[in-house]
Image (cartoon, rainbow, N blue to C red):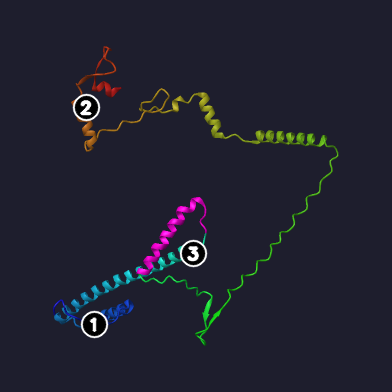
Amino acid sequence: ASSSTEYPWQTELQITHDRRKINDILERRGAEIRNFYEQSQNSVDDCHLLEREWLALVTEKDKNLCKQIEEENEQAKRNQIKQLHQVLESLGTFNFNKPNEAILKRNLAKMYHQIGKYCSRNKIDVTMKDSSNTITSSDSPDENILVAPPAPPPPPPPILIPPPPPPPPLTPLTSINATPQNDTKNLSRKRGALTARNISTTPCDRRNEELLKKIRGGCRSELRRTSFKRSPGGTPFKRQRRVSDSNASDLITVALKKKFQNVTFQSPRENDSPRSFTSFEDLQQN
């Protein structure tokens, strides 16, 4: 069989243009080919023929899918263009009389004119069809019954807020000037009693007592001496990193030190000083 062999399902595809029907035909033939392929495992020629038909079937399915996507995108674009035309047409009923709306009004008019031309060229129906409130009866299809929109739901009942509780009764004051002073005196006495009680009853920690005794008696003998170099304040210096033979940066640093060990150069800041020539080691120490 040649590559230009025409299969029966290809003839069926030429009859219809519905993408769903085409997809059903291809799926049905694909299931048949799988069944035939399992039954003809002993015949090599039959397997080759089924494989060629399967490749042609898969190619046709890809084409059908691409065309279906293109048609859906085109239909979505036509719907959006139609909605845009209707929006621009409804905007034409408004007034744009403000000075800062003159440019907007002119651009909307141009866009409305261009969208109208596009719709007429591509045969897009832009007529306003308001079928939301129109219901056609099944008994008399020629008569339209207008149904009013449903009434809005009744408003919710008002929320009753309970009245606030009554204020507590006021205690009469015998002497206005004497009572606040007595209260402040009582508070100060209570605070003093609490602080004295806390100080007297709080036990001391035994570990703190032992530490204080050691510090007073001199605990220098218990402190360990370390070999770390420290600053005058007692902070240990950071250890210098060891030079590694496998690190490229360390090898380059060692080579540069050896190369410029005996090289001297004149410092531009110390031209008049007696130590105007500085070596690489001096710079490294500084």
Count neighbours of disc 2 (C-alpha within 10 A) and say few if under 14, some if 14 to 19, many if 20 or more: some
Q: Which residue is mark 1?
A: 11
Element assignment for label 3: helix
Give the residue displayed 44% in from the left and 59% down from the top: 108
Say which quarter of the image contains residue 209. top right
- Where does residue 276 sit, x and y in percent of width and height? 25, 15
> 62 or 52: which is nearer to us?
62
Q: Which quadrant holds residue 184? A: top right
Q: Position of residue 204 (x, y in %)?
A: 59, 34
Residue 122 falls left or right of residue 274? right
The three-letter amino acid code for the residue at tag 3 is: Ser
SS state under label 1: helix
> Is 98 in the magenta?
yes
C-alpha distance separating marks 3 and 2: 84 Å
Look at the image and tell me in which quarter the N terminus lies: bottom left
Residue 13 included in the magenta stretch of the image: no
The amino acid at mark 1 is Thr
Q: Is residue 215 above or below residue 162?
A: above
Nearer the N terminus, badge 2 or badge 1? Answer: 1
Callout 3 crowding tier (Cα within 10 Å): few <14, some 14–19, many ≥20:
few
Is 86 above or below relative to 168?
Answer: below
Q: Nearer the viewer, mark 3 or mark 1?
A: 3
